[in-house]
Image (tube, grey):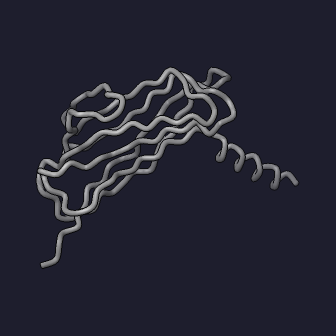
Amino acid sequence: ILTLGGIVFLAFRYVFTPTIIKKHSHFGSLTKDREVLISLDVKNKSLMEVKDIVVRDFVPGIAKVVPKFDSLKPTIREGQNGTELFWRFDSLRPGEERIVAYRIKPVMDVVGSIRLPSAMANYTNRKKQRKKIASSGISIHSHHKKK
């Protein structure tokens, strides 16, 4: 019974916690002339409101961020190894979701794929505890046309 209770508790925590999902919409070759759209879907699946959400993503030096944004514009911090992007939200009610997006361009033509790291989000729960969640990383594959 104790094991079953533990499994139910972990399943409940997994289902009812905020999530962040990182996606891309790209098909074809990865060239320095083509933009790749990256989206981050932050959803509050918990039963309580979360506050002070900070979403952070990192673009490695193999690509650069295109400075036009279809959604909320991030704070951008350029570094030697790449570019950091930050978005801030005051709160997310239960079931509410926000999708932020940005575009990247490879700095050179890519034959294989580009691997982008996980996006992270920090938030404060109703107990005023600071929590952290992460998406999975993504790979963007270059598909060349066969002649």
Q: Position of residue 142 (x, y in %)?
A: 23, 63
Q: Which residue is depicted at the point 31% across and 35% down?
A: 70
Q: Nearer the viewer, residue 71 or 13?
A: 71
Q: Residue furthest bottom?
A: 147
Q: How many tags in the picture?
A: 0
Q: Position of residue 61 (x, y in %)?
A: 20, 43
Q: Residue furthest right?
A: 1
Q: Position of residue 92 (x, y in %)?
A: 56, 28
Q: Residue furthest front?
A: 70
Quadrant for residue 39, please give it: top left
Is residue 54 shown above or below 60? above
Q: Which quadrant holds the C terminus?
A: bottom left
Q: Which residue is depicted at the point 66% across and 46% down?
A: 15
Residue 90 horizontal side relative to residue 60, left or right: right
Is residue 10 shown above or below 18? below
Q: Which quadrant holds the N terminus?
A: bottom right
Q: Which residue is depicted at the point 49% across and 42% down?
A: 20
Is residue 84 shown above or below 36? above
Residue 98 horizontal side relative to residue 125, left or right: left
Q: Position of residue 118 (x, y in %)?
A: 40, 45
Residue 110 horizontal side relative to residue 69, left or right: left
